[in-house]
Amino acid sequence: MTEQKTTDLPALTAPPRRTLGDQLRQPAVWISGLVLLAVLVLSWLVWQGSERLESTRQELSRRLADSEAVQREALASTKQDRVALDALQAKVGALDARAAEMQSQQLALETMYQELSRVREDRLLAEIEQDVAMAAQQLQLAGNVAAALISLQGAEARLAKNAQPQFLPLRKLLNRDIERLKALPGADVPGIAMKLNDMLEAVPNLPLAYEQRPAPAESAKTVKPAKSREAPAAALAKAFDWQAIGRAWLADLWHEVRQLVRIERIDRPDPGLLSPRESLFLRENLRLRLLSARLGLLARDGSSFLTDLKQADEWLERYFDTRAPAVENARATLKNLAKQEVGAQPVELNETLAALRNFTLGRDRGASR
């Protein structure tokens, strides 16, 4: 059966053999070639793209790595900057706190300085007022122009040293008072008052006229025996001459008797005897006159001053021993004092004192607001 079946099949014949030209002329060959060429081109393009993509990927990877490194560096730098910024912020905070503390200290110092300046100015004004008040007392009570001038010049020097413009009006007033004191007559009031005080102390010891004693008479000169060249025996006999001794004793007795009575000529009326009570009243009245003269001197009352001096000089001439050196000196002093010009009115410093007090009150009111 196998063979039968085999014989039943048609016999296969070999296809005709085609040439290369024939094969090339067929469309399928052309299409296949084009497809193959397209595949090759596409493969080449794919290979080129993959190469470029790989290079791009590598470049991107490199750049990403670089960017990551830069980023890491940036992060590290940022961390360092953050740390530095935090440190700077801490320092700035500390500086701000220190600045605030310094500002508060500066304010405290300014306040303290103002307080100290105010205290210093208050003390300066108090010293100036004290100097002016002292000058006024010297002028009114003692008439001491020199001491008053020294006090005012010292006050003006303190204000000039302070060099504050608000003190200029006070300096003008002080300079005006200084010029007024310099223009006063040159009577030495303290010196005159001192001389009057010396006379007041000397009044109890001035001798009265009725107590005066005549000038002591010259005592008899003792005649010394001349030296003789007699023999010692003769000299011894002469030393025991009772007659010579008696004559010498009688001479001494007569000298003492003559001292009991003395006659003198008085050119002025006899002042008469004064009882101890009257002598005390006389001396006290003389002291009162000298005290009144001193008050007139301090008050610049020239008329009263001259009247008291004249009356005191008259009492000295009438009731006291004018030949005594103490009385002569007292009268000479009174005559010299009477020639002094003491009638000038003292300079008053009330305006300057009032200006000082008003200035102090104005500063106190300004500080209390």
Image: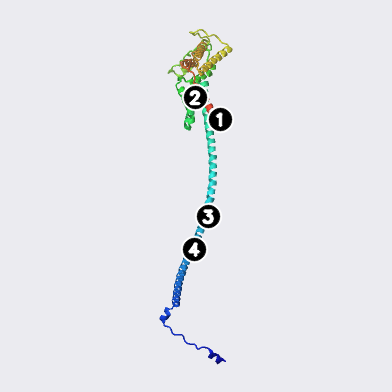
- Secondary structure beneath dot 3 equals helix
**Mark 4: amino acid:** Leu
Give the number of the disc on residue 312. none
Find disc 4 in the rendering and name its residue.
Answer: 64
- Secondary structure beneath dot 2 equals helix
- Frontmost of labels 3 and 2 is 3
**Mark 4 vs 3: CB contact within 8 A:** no
Q: Residue furthest left?
A: 21
Find disc 2 in the rendering and name its residue.
Answer: 148
Q: Residues within 10 Å of mark 3 (few under 14, many from 20)?
A: some
- Frontmost of labels 1 and 3 is 3
Q: Earlier in the sequence, mark 1 or mark 3?
A: 3
Find disc 3 in the rendering and name its residue.
Answer: 82
Q: Residues within 10 Å of mark 4 (few under 14, many from 20)?
A: some
- Frontmost of labels 1 and 2 is 1
Q: Position of residue 112 (x, y in %)?
A: 54, 38
Question: Disc 4 to disc 1, how far (Cα)?
Answer: 81 Å
Q: Position of residue 144 (x, y in %)?
A: 49, 22
- Frontmost of labels 4 and 2 is 4
Total labels: the figure holds 4
Find disc 1 in the rendering and name its residue.
Answer: 365
**Mark 3: amino acid:** Arg
